[in-house]
Image (spheres, rainbow, N blue to C red):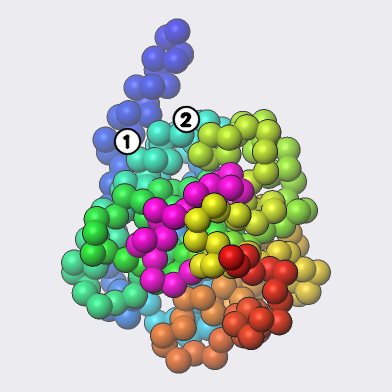
Amino acid sequence: MNRVLSLSGLVFVGLALTGCATDYGKRADNGLTFYCPGAGNADMGDAGLRSGLQRAGYRGQVARLTWSVSFNAVVDQTVRVIARQGGKNLARCIEDYIDKYPGREVNLVGLSAGTGVAIFGLEELKPGYEVNNVVLIASSLHHKYDVGKALRRVKGRIYCYYSRNDAVLASLMKAFGTIDGVFLEDGAGAVGLHSPRGADRIVNIGWRPEFEKYGYFGGHTDGTSAAFVQEYIAGHIVTSQHVARSRIVAAIESAKVPRDARRD
């Protein structure tokens, strides 16, 4: 009982202290991409994201949202109020940025449990605030999570990168549950996101052997490698900056990979 009370105290004190403290730099004038890391905030995916986007010509800022209060992956995945509160904090950060930089593009990238934070954040946005595109990598959201409400705050699409080779999603996540609380079922990062609403605006991109050339081997965190971000993910974020689009975006938009695009 004392251990439970101590954990609860840690969580709620942390929730009270966690908030939006983004220090906008000069690059923020050209747009902002929020990165939501996985459970425990242990991954350094923002480093690969930042490097890859800059190599692709992105002129905006990448901001990492530290949403964990325990810095323990198991706690973050199972005490789901942490991710929900992280989503509320993200929403306030997005609103703050849009208020300070009206007209600039905002994009979201989430990894693993951070994809839940990204989607929860969209659900918490006030009317009148929108983001451009959303990229989910190795998502631990349930594969049938309803993103209909979140899509109301998205101008473009949700891109979901998934891999059946992701050992974390195939084993540990099923035992501990998805970030939205479903047990013993697949996460979107394993089989794609198949929401009952908004399927026409969800693009599922399955892992392919050719991705290995760019450092993405189908594992749980390597989808944020700088080379992969530059070659593929950047195309979802730099679209308005007249930068050459990646091959995967061109393929999706010309319907050359229909099996990866979920449509009504």
**In the figure, 165 relative to 245: above or below?**
above
Amino acid under disc 1: Leu
> Disc 2 marks which residue?
79
Are there few (<14), some (14-19), or many (20+) residues within 10 Å of tag 2? some
Count of marks placed on residues: 2
Q: Residue at point 45% right, 8% down?
A: 1
Picture quadrant where residue 148 is located: bottom left
Q: Residue at point 71% right, 64% down?
A: 206
User: Which residue in the rendered view is the most extreme toward the left?
Assistant: 99
User: Which residue in the rendered view is the most extreme toward the right?
Assistant: 209
**In the figure, 62 relative to 35: above or below?**
below
Q: Which contiguous range is marked in magenta?
A: 139-157
User: Does residue 223 appear to the left or right of 77 in the view shown?
Assistant: right
Amino acid under disc 2: Val
Q: Are marks 2 and 1 in contact (CB under 8 Å)?
A: no
Quadrant containing the C terminus is: bottom right
Picture quadrant where residue 12 is located: top left
Are there few (<14), some (14-19), or many (20+) residues within 10 Å of tag 1? many
Q: Nearer the viewer, residue 227 or 101?
A: 101
User: Is residue 151 in the magenta section?
Assistant: yes
Which one is earlier in the sequence, the residue at label 2 or at label 1?
1
Most prominent secondary structure in the magenta stretch? Answer: loop
**What percent of the width, then of the height, locates residue 247?**
65, 84
> Disc 1 marks which residue?
15
Q: CA distance from mark 2 to mark 1?
A: 12 Å
Q: Nearer the viewer, residue 108 or 60?
A: 108
Q: Secondary structure at mark 2?
A: loop
User: Does residue 31 appear to the left or right of 237 in the view shown?
Assistant: left
Q: Secondary structure at mark 1?
A: helix
**What percent of the width, then of the height, locates residue 237?**
47, 76
